[in-house]
Amino acid sequence: MREQVETMSDEDMNDAGTDVASVTPPTMPLPRVMPQVVQEPAPATGTMSAERVAAKALESRLLGGERKLRRREVAAGAGLSLLSARKLWRALGFPNYSDEDVAFTERDQAALGAIVDLVRAEKLTEEAAISITRSIGQMTDRMVVWQIEALIEDMVHEQGVTDAVARKQLVNDLPALVDALEEMLVYSYRRQLNAGVQRLAVRAEAGLQASEEGREGDEDDAPLPLARAVGFADLVSYTSLSRRMNEKTLARLVQRFENKCAEIISVGGGRLVKTVGDEVLYIAETPAAGAEISLALAQAFTEDEILPEARVAMVWGRILSRLGDIYGPTVNLAARLTSLADPGTVLVDSMTASALEQDERFVLLPQPAEDVRGFGEIHPVLLARGRGNGLVLD
């Protein structure tokens, strides 16, 4: 019966604020089972007890109090059905708690109510609310894993402790960092939100006009809403290198690669869309900005004493931006060109070359035609440095 309640539609649930458990039809009484009380053996020393106390205190601080509420109580307190609450919790990436689990605090209820109020006020549709909630869940999940591992790695390196000791020590060290990290998160979110509005709304029309100028007569990608320079950078021989490295050395190589890419792309005014192992995908608002970033990436890895060279390709065209990622033929073509580039070089397609040919900062050298899967015959163009010094990195 319980499962029937959880799969009922929202219309069948009780009015807002009512415990949805009350709609459960009566069931046959179950045999009474006396709970078993299991006593944990006292630790030999006070170390474990102190660790548990510290972990409990940290959890209470992060969650806004002790876990006192069950999922039905939180849903009812926020004035929505359990089904709707579960949709939002799944979007955030929370585990699937049962009715008996005391897993929530009053802050969980307040957060649930905040997003629901936007839907009730018709500022968001339910679909948009779930999509936005999923973006928060996925991005913060990756962010906290990154931060925790960075703190642990720093303790291992600077304090000379083992990885296991560092992970235990983190529980004691983290409370002193929480407020500053949270402040930086909110600050960065507001800055990034402003920058995103400028890129994706305020300046979008200018990019589309530039796209029309660079691709006259090309109507295949016209329905796509944004014009961007799309680039890939791919480390050469990464697979063979990774097989010869231990975990720590490989982690440092990947981190060095990501950090260098992020710095160059940021300085060039672009955005790092994602990193997948030995490859980064990035975008820029103009063909020239994309070209500058691409040349800087190729040069940086050629000159790096630790990292191998990189193959780089960039294509100017229209894209679809969804779920923090980008899609469309422009992205696919850039990926195909990357595999054709020689180590340490940058390739563009002929349309992108046309958009750059009047710019003295770049030299464009046509290459032999290539048959590319999904695109037929294309005419790659080697992009090289012309006048100027390119991006200046501190």
Image (tube, rainbow, N blue to C red):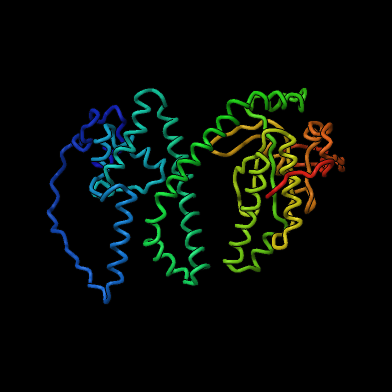
306 lies left or right of 28: right
Q: How far across and down, in percent of the image, does residue 205 sit? A: 64, 23
Q: Quadrant of the N terminus?
A: top left
Q: Residue sitting at 26 percent across and 73 percent down?
A: 43
Which residue is drawn at the image coordinates 65% and 39% (left, top)? Answer: 270
Left or right of residue 121: residue 30: left
Question: Does 116 sit left or right of 322 as displayed?
Answer: left
Q: Residue at 37% across / 38% down in the picture? A: 87
The image shows residue 40, relative to residue 31, as above or below, that is below
**Nearer to me, 205 or 172:** 172
Number of numbered discs on residues: 0
Q: Position of residue 329 (x, y in %)?
A: 68, 35
Q: Nearer the viewer, residue 191 or 229?
A: 191
Q: Percent x, y for residue 227?
A: 67, 30
| Name of the residue lying farthest toward the bottom | 44
Image quadrant in which you'd find residue 56:
bottom left
Image point 81% across, 35% down: which residue? 353
- Residue 116 x %, y %: 34, 31
